Structures are given as C-alpha cells and as structure tokens.
C-alpha cells in the first residue's frame, strides 16, 4: 500500500485479519478507537471485525506491506464506518412523521 501526503483511509472493518509492516513514512492508525503512530519498521495487526483507519502523518508518502488472511471475499470485503453512519441517519429519520402520519 502507498498513500500520498494527506491521504486517508477512512475507518472500516473486514471479515478477515490484516497485518501491516511500515516500510516508509509515518502513519496515524486507529484500531478499535485506539490511536497509534506507526513508523518505518513498526508492525500492526487488525483482527476480523476490528474497526481501523489510516492517515498519512508525514510530508512524503507512507508505504506498508499488508497481508490478509484468509483471502478476502470477492465482494463486500470493506465495510466503511461512513456508510453505516449514513444508513443510521437515514433510518433514524424514517420515523420523523414528515409524511403526515403519526408514528408510535
């Protein structure tokens, strides 16, 4: 993986595990709400279902080697937090009564 300065991988999870070996640069990583600054030579792991995300924290590119196990499924391997938040907002507003009907 490689991210340019100011690049972000928004928080998401997977139905598989990932490991990361930082090869170059500096990245701010979040794993289940805990923030970590990772640099060249650092390793990290995200288990299945761990909500994680990355932000390039340096002036140059950040590069890391990423492994995944088991092999990711052909579809729906990324579950982004922003999509779930949007769905929650849409469904949360579904019972507002803006169609003239009263809801219990």
Image: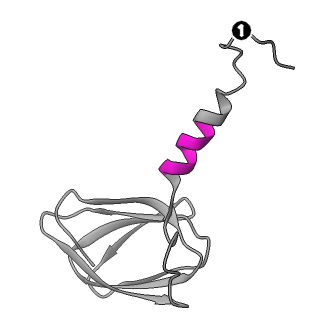
Q: Which range is magenta?
A: 82-89
Residue 101 shown left or right of residue 42 in the figure: right
Residue most toward the right? 104
46, 83: nearer the viewer: 83
Number of numbered discs overlaid on the protein picture:
1
Quarter location, residue 67: bottom left
Residue drawn 49% across the image and 67% down it: 78
Residue drawn 51% across the image and 50% down it: 83
Image location of residue 81, percent across then percent down: 52, 53
Image location of residue 60, percent across then percent down: 12, 68
Residue drawn 52% across the image and 69% down it: 76
46, 86: nearer the viewer: 86
Above or below for 89 versus 57: above
Report helix, strand or loop for mark 1: loop
Which part of the image, by quadrant, shows the C terminus? Answer: top right
User: What kind of colouring is applied to the model shown?
Assistant: one colour
Quarter location, residue 19: bottom left
* Residue wearing tag 1: 100
Image location of residue 18, percent across then percent down: 48, 83
């Amino acid at each position: 993986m490689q991210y340019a300065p100011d690049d972000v991988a928004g928080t998401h999870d997977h139905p598989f595990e990932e490991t990361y070996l930082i090869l170059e640069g500096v990245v701010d990583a979040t794993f289940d709400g805990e923030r970590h600054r990772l640099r060249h030579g650092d390793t990290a792991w995200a288990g299945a279902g761990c909500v994680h995300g990355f932000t390039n924290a340096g002036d140059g590119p950040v590069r890391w080697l990423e492994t995944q196990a088991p092999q990711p499924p052909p579809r729906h391997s990324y579950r982004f937090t922003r999509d779930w938040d949007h769905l929650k907002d849409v469904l949360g507003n579904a019972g507002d009564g803006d169609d003239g009907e009263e809801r219990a």
